[in-house]
Amino acid sequence: QLQLQESGPGLVKPSETLSLTCTVSGGSFSTSTSYYWGWIRQPPGKGLEWIGTIYYSGNTYYSPSLKSRVTISVDTSKNHFSLKLTSVTAADTAVYYCAGFWGSYRRIDYWGQGTLVTVSS
Amino acid sequence: QSALTQPASVSGSPGQSITISCTGTSSDVGGYNYVSWYQQHPGKTPKLMIYDVTNRPSGVSDRFSGSKSGNTASLTISGLQAEDEADYYCFSYTSNNLGVFGTGTKVTVL
């Protein structure tokens, strides 16, 4: 059973880049053909938002509303994947979850515990 | 790609049944049988309740069931219990290999 854990700064200044890492333990995830690995966020008191995913092939898929600012990448040597979100504003303040999506997003099998990122000067 | 539409809130008395709708388009809910539902209690990580429209993971109560008609998927909770009070989100595969969540529904047990 894989376990996911997010890490990164809890406070980011406006206009800067938000960077988070999701470390996967309990097995190697990067070569799995069954899963997409990605990110979901939830602003305080609001709903869930799908940010994007990366497949083992390296193909990435991003929410159209965030596509111009998002990059998801994988570091297989460290068994982790990462999120970068540029030019952040207060609207990007949220709990960020890393997640494992089975099949064509048929279900989300794995969730990190979530990490709150606040955008403020 | 807009969020799927869910009612903001649904309520019911213990023992009753409630249904939460999730409306999308032919590019997401209506086009694929890849709708899943998640339960989220305050401060907790979402929990998978239904996948592939109607399938229930092991360990999830059979009081939870899913269905779909056209562009609208539904989650029904039968025999409502106090522990079912939570937020519920639908999620769907969309064309071009993207994903989209519903707006979320707060379930209140009266």
Image: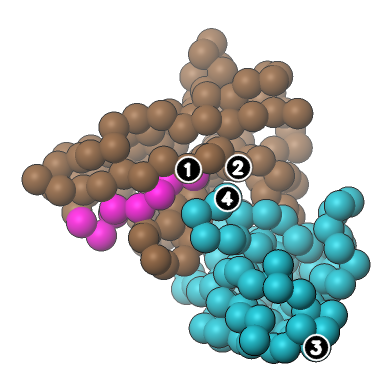
Regarding residue B12, the answer to whether it shows in the image is yes
Q: Colour of chain B?
A: cyan
Picture residue at 29% right of the left edge, 32% below the top: A9
Q: CA distance from mark 1 to mark 4?
A: 7 Å
Amino acid bearing label 1: Gly
- The quadrant holding residue B51 is bottom right
> Which mark is on residue B16?
3
Magenta part of the chain: A90-97
User: Foreground mark, 2 or 3?
Assistant: 3
Q: Chain of mark 3?
A: B
The x, y position of residue A110, in whole percent, is 66, 41
Does mark 2 fall on the same chain as mark 4?
A: no
**Residue visible at 75% across and 28% down in the picture:** A1
User: Nearer the viewer's eye, disc 4 or disc 3?
Assistant: 3
- B43 to B95, vertically: above or below: above
SS category of the residue bearing label 1: loop
Subunit ID for the residue under disc 4: B
Q: Colour of chain A?
A: brown
Identify the secondary structure beneath mark 2: strand
Q: Are marks 1 and 4 in contact (CB under 8 Å)?
A: yes
